[in-house]
Image (cartoon, helix red, strand yellow):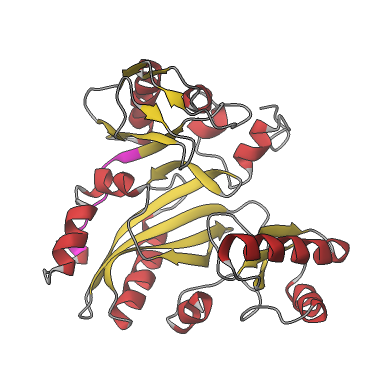
């Protein structure tokens, strides 16, 4: 339904089925029409659950049954749909604000291409690969769609981006984990504006008044082994957050805090802002080296390695890059 709505509103979508597939034969016909590889996705899902890739026709039946079973277990709905599987896309999302009365603006984009098992790990804005003209075009497309549907509140429209083309994948009608990236580069408090607009207030600015200021990167520091990603609940024996100009920590933990085994393993978000991406990366390296979380395992060592990788420094990565890096596979002919 989200894809149908997006298409009706003029938002570009990934080629695929118009809705849930009704049978194996139906799925095969659709897959052949859009071309392999294809992605099987849970119709009621999100967060990477119920999502499988079929590289060839021989893979499709297994992908369908596996994704359907995962979808039924996670969401109580076994229905799945098909999309064209893009080879090396970026994950780029547009932040929007709507007043519910036909007014809407966009606040630029975030690049969330560094992912593991479809879970975002590192987010930055603006995207290293998006020019101002492309940003303005896709941003206005999204803002116009939100004006047409009289959208109320904050929202994020997520795309895959490859070869200069955007393909809608989903919309999150809420605050995102990575919202501090946008706050840093626009100087707009999204949580405040969400509450204010819901109370009947106006949008914080006109579109022409929105400016992208510098560059921001967010690292999700999780209580996990940095190599195996095994959860690491337990008591934090030492906690030292980094500080300084352009450094922000969003966290509720402290020395003596116990990370429980029952919930998301997020310890905190480290957000760094700089006048340029190069300055931002420099500050991020210093902040990561300064941050101390002892007593449990965290993903800090992974980020300390990533921030020194040539591809990351150059902004030359895609949604499969991190998993290839973690697996020790060559990345476009280069050793990780």
Give the percent coordinates (x, y) of residue 98.
25, 70
Q: Tell me if residue 10 comes above or below residue 304 in the rendering.
A: below
Q: Tell me if residue 61 comes above or below residue 10 in the rendering.
A: above
Decide which of 126, 218 is in the foreground and name it.
218
The quadrant of the image that shows the C terminus is top right
Decide which of 290, 256 is in the foreground and name it.
256
Q: Tell me if residue 3 comes above or below residue 268 in the rendering.
A: below
- Residue 125 appears in the figure: yes
Q: Image point 32% across, 44% down: which residue?
A: 181
Give the percent coordinates (x, y) of residue 122.
46, 39
Q: Image point 32% across, 75% down: which residue?
A: 146
Q: Image point 76% across, 76% down: which residue?
A: 27
Give the percent coordinates (x, y) of residue 302.
53, 26
Quadrant assignment, res 24: bottom right
Q: Image point 68% across, 67% down: which residue?
A: 84
Give the percent coordinates (x, y) of residue 305.
53, 23
Magenta run includes residue 224: no
Decide which of 239, 213 is in the foreground and name it.
239
- Residue 203 appears in the figure: no
The boundaries of the magenta stretch are: 208-216
């Amino acid at each position: 339904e989200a894809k149908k709505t997006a298409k009706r509103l003029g938002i570009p979508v990934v080629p695929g089925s118009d809705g849930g597939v009704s049978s194996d034969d139906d799925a095969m016909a659709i897959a052949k029409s859009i071309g392999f590889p294809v992605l099987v996705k849970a119709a009621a899902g999100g967060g990477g659950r119920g999502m499988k890739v079929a590289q060839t026709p021989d893979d499709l039946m297994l992908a369908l049954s596996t994704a359907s079973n995962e979808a039924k277990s996670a969401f109580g709905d076994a229905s799945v749909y098909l999309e064209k599987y893009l080879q090396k896309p970026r994950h780029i999302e547009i932040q929007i604000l709507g007043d519910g009365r036909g007014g809407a603006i966009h606040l630029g984009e975030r690049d969330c291409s560094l992912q593991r098992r479809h879970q975002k790990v590192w987010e930055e804005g603006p995207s290293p690969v998006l020019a101002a003209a492309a940003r303005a075009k896709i941003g206005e497309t999204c803002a116009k769609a939100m004006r047409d549907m009289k959208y109320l509140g904050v929202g994020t429209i997520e795309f895959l981006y490859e070869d200069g083309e955007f393909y809608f994948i989903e919309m999150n009608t809420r605050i995102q984990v990575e919202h501090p990236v946008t706050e840093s580069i626009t100087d707009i408090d999204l949580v405040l504006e969400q509450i204010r607009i819901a109370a009947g207030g106006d949008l914080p600015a006109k579109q022409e008044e929105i400016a992208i200021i510098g560059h921001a990167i967010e690292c999700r520091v999780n209580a996990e082994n940095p190599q195996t990603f095994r959860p690491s609940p337990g008591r934090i024996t030492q906690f030292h957050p980094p500080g300084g100009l352009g450094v922000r920590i969003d966290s509720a933990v402290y020395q003596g805090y116990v990370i429980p085994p029952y919930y998301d393993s997020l310890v905190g978000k480290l957000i760094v802002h700089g006048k340029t991406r190069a300055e931002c990366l420099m500050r991020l390296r210093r902040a990561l080296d300064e941050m101390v979380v002892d007593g449990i395992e965290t993903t800090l060592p992974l980020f300390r390695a990533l921030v020194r990788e040539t591809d990351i420094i150059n902004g030359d990565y895609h949604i499969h890059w991190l998993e290839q890096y973690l697996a020790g596979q060559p990345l476009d002919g280069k050793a990780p």
